[in-house]
Amino acid sequence: MRFSTTFVLLGIALLLGGFIYLFENKWESTDEILRKREQKHVLEGIGWNDANKLEIKAPSGELVLERVKEPSDWRIVKPIQYPAEKAAIDSVVNTFEFFSYKGKIPQEAGKTLDLSLYGLDKPRGSLVVHYKKDKAEKSVTLKFGEKSAVGDQVYLQVEGNPDVYTVEPTLWKNLDKKLTDWRDRTLARFEVFEVEKLLLGVGDTELELAKKDDKWSVVRPYADRADDDKVRELLTQLHDVRVEEFTADEVKDFAQYGLDKPALRYTVFTRGNEKGSSVAIGGPAPDNAGRTYARNLENETVLSIKSESAAKAKIDPSSLRSRLFCDVDPAKVSRVSIEKAGAEVASLEKDKDGWKMKLPADYSFDLGTVVPFLNKVKDLKVSEFAADAPTDLAPFGLDKPLGKVKVAWPAKEEGKFEETSFTLGRSAQKPDVTYAQLAGAARVVALPKDAAELVERGAIHFRNRSMLSIARQKIVSLALTEGMNRTICVRGANDKWTIEGTTTEPNLAFLEDVLDNLCYLRAGELVAEGAADLAPFGLDKPQVKVQFTYLEDAPAPATPPAEGAPKPEPKRIDETLILGSDTMVAGTAACHARLESKPFVFTVEKHVLDGLKKDLRPAPAKKPEGPEAPKAEPPKEPAPQAETPPVEPPKADAPPQPQPPAPAPAPAPSQPPAQPEPPKADAPAQPQPPAAPPADAPKPDAPAGS
């Protein structure tokens, strides 16, 4: 083994031995620390929750406090009757359990300590702690003397014990306070989450609210749902109101403070507190700007609070009513019914397989429309509380309602259902308001105008939204009109589109957009069925009109055709789509639309309108990029041919001579050379292809000679 390893192991052994020595001989356990602290304990055996009465004498005055409710609700009983500030009490009683002395001056046997040396012959103050221990009432008295000569400590003596102690000054400082520091500055003492009932009075209006299953409701003077968030917000504001000044005690005449007829009064009831905590808020303090008088009815003291806090508490009681018209959970609903003029026009039920349309029968039903309909019902918001208990429903159009909506869901009891139903009406005096009344409720409320569509649209809420489904190759002609512009396109041989009456192609890119938006047209919402007046939808003067013809295959014959029989010709169907005024659907831009073959007014998203608003005329040709192409020169006249001299016949004895090749015959004068067709007036000049380079010429992208 190396010497270095030996030294390392030896060092570890020494450290371990030292740790064990310190642990066994020097370190104190927690129990030992507490035991030594208890040996210096002044109030042995008294915990923070044991004390039930405190008697305090200090230069600031005399005070008696009593515990009135477990665990920490204290009240001043002398010199006045008033709730005590919790923080002030806690600063005293929380020190009892660990109140220890720093030094001790014992009285020697046979001698008496001179208490004047410590200011204890005439103590600066005292604290009498009454407490209950082992079911017996006990008390202990602490006397406080002067400050010690050394250190920031005070002398203390426990009555019945001749010894003198030095202690930290914290307890004494927490005892020597003015009366106002001991008084609770909370206007009404309660915890928001514990409140179960609230009485609220503003002027002549009184409102009673109660909480059940963590939901708030109005109980009096009418029955209605309350806005849970707003009730909690109000309770929080009332809880947080703080007393700024204790204006007067033992008051007999509250009129001078505006508290004989307070502007606001409320009583808060918490669990187990049937009496409640009542508060009145009066008029402004004339000699203190920004302050308002208030009073807790448990005592005869007038207080002042911030006017800002008073203003927040002075709310319109009706603002606590829920603006949510009805409580519906779309996920639980299993039945939907719509009535118009007293007759049911739509009925749906949900079973294990999903939603089914019961009425009308054999309806083109779209499963995906039910939840959006229920969400509209759930999201209905009250814009005005029109009347709480009207005796005449005619002013609201509810004597002859537009219709009724009913939704139901399974109850907890097997085979039973719970339901919510409401009627909708419209007044001739206010045609832009839809009035509603829940079944079993007296109140009438105003809803937004479009709430009437829930019954006016009837079964079309749930109709299939597919308006057109046509293969694009089936469309054979199309006429698009926008304002004064009208373009007609026809599909010819080889599926080639042309402008009607010409051989010119339309703008094919735009035509593709039109066909894309047309062939599989789908409605966003079905707005009306069989509307006689199209003006409200802008369809009397449409933005765009599309007329088109498409082919529909003939239906298959009932019996197979004879062999060689001609195939049935497809049927030509004419259709017209018009697009009217712009609108909004669920926050999305849209416009109204109608097909000539269908009785519905529906909406389509704005991008569909944009896709159909196209100029189908041929687009002007773009100029070629780069330098301008050279203009084509007209062809030159052919050069005149030289006359061929006559050939003499060969002599008889002359040898035969070789004959030159016959020249090419000149073109006949009646057939001049073909001229290139001049360019059309509306077509750009076509550049001529460059002449072919010589065979030995270098390629453009290669250096010469390569």
Image: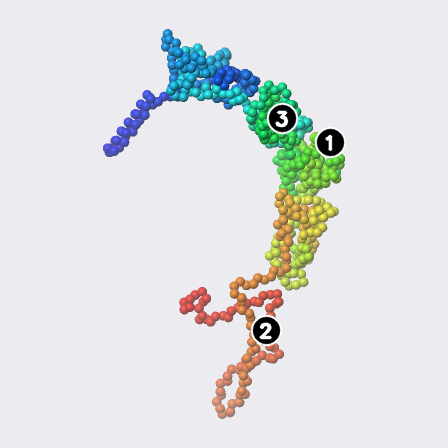
Return the residue found at the far front: 287
Q: Give the amino acid type for the residue marked by disc 1 in the picture.
A: Pro
- Residue 620 seen in the current view: yes
Q: Is residue 251 above or below residue 427?
A: above
Q: Secondary structure at mark 1?
A: loop
Which residue is labeled 2 in the image?
675
The span from disc 1 to disc 3 (Cα, nearest Å) is: 34 Å
Which amino acid type is shown beneath numbered disc 2? Gln
Q: Which quadrant is home to the C terminus?
A: bottom left
| Residue at point 66%, 63% (across, down) | 502
Do the residues under discs 3 and 2 have CB atoms within 8 angstroms?
no
Q: What's the amino acid at mark 3? A: Gly
Q: Nearer the viewer, residue 101 or 467?
A: 101
Residue 390 disc label: 1
Q: Would you say 706 lies left or right of 505 here? A: left
The Cα–Cα distance between marks 1 and 2, rounded to whole angstroms, is 95 Å
